[in-house]
Image (spheres, grey):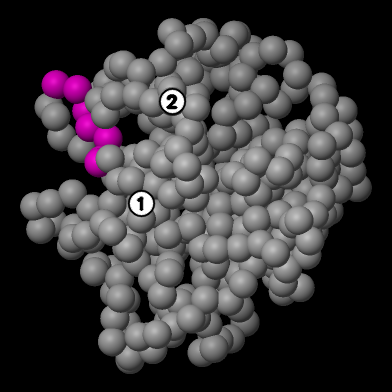
Amino acid sequence: MGAGAATRILVLGLATLALSVPGAGQEYPSASWESSPVAIDWNGDDVMDLLVGDDDGFISLFLGIADDPLGFNFAGLLRVEGSGEPLRVPREAHPEATDWNGDGIIDLVVGDDVGFVTLFLGRSPGGMMVSPGMPVDLANGIPLRVHAEARPRCIDWNGDGAEDLIVGTNSDGLYIFLNTGSSANRLLSRGIRPRSSLGGELRLSNPVIAPWVGDWNGDGLLDLIIGCSVVLPEPDSSSMYPCCEGSRGHVFYYQNVGSVNSPLFDEGVQLEAASQPIDVGDSAAPYAFDWTGDGLLDLIVGSNSGAIWFFERAEAESLDMIAVPDQDGDGIPDPHDICPHQAGEMNQGGC
């Protein structure tokens, strides 16, 4: 696939799904603010699905369509067993999917705006119900908490066979909570920071640190893809998002130049699309997966506006995307405009 070939925006079925206003008594398929996506085969049909956390603390499930790698049908909000109420955390749900207790059923680890991480155990494969939430504790029994806006990822960080917990924060960088137990019986140590190849800790100071951890360049080592908000010294009225004139939602790549057991990261490289820095408006939340089956990791990126962008990787070290029209003239390209407006209207949190 050559350069310039990539691209459409991942719309989450907005052409066919009716969006309703939060609080109107109906479920709604996507947030008006702060989308936080995770790719997972939730129902075991070998088709990739999406879990999307939102600013109101809910998590929506979108089931993938077998013959359309970028097609999804809204299945509903995940709910808590017993009460039947929607799963909800205190604002800004940032989900991660993993088998936390080793029972073969996908569980959810969900960060929130206050900095806590909550565990919701899955009740049945592919089901919409989860167990009531319980705090994720450190080995000493103290609930894990970071500065604010906890954004968790679960992966074996140091190659010892036990899945660890990586948590991004708002304004306080990235923390690694090493698991000194097992993947089924987790004992999380106090948080440490990743290490820099320049010496010392890898400092990530931008507001909102949304991590994805995996082998981006195919060398067998865990790299970091970090979404963030970059605050501008002056508001930029040219922003495509009227709500985000004071910041930019950029994505950075940190290559692991250490080893499987001892990751060590070079300075960050800003990812670009069509020779321009990726900018999703604010609060970029990336997740990498080979969506097109060409052997290259692509990106989906959530954002403060509620939009989810898709960036197809055309070559091993490139990303491309095409421009999208703004037919209603509200300054937001239509295919990822969660709440269509007339020209001049501001998107103030609800559709």
Which image quadrant is residue 153 in?
top right
Residue that appears at 33% across and 91% down: 344
What residue is disc 2 on? 45
Kindly give the residue lying farthest to the left in the view shown: 25
Rendering coords of residue 299 (x, y %): 62, 51
Rendering coords of residue 304 (x, y %): 44, 63
Which image quadrant is residue 154 in?
top right
Residue that appears at 44% across and 83% down: 326
SS for dot 2: loop
What number is the disc on residue 54? 1
- Which one is in front, 211 or 337? 337
Residue that appears at 81% across and 31% down: 221
Image side of residue 273 versus residue 238, left or right: right
Rendering coords of residue 81 (x, y %): 19, 22
Amino acid at the residue labelled 1? Asp
SS for dot 1: loop
Q: Quadrant of the C terminus?
A: bottom left
* Label 1 – label 2 distance at C-alpha: 25 Å
Rendering coords of residue 25 (x, y %): 8, 52
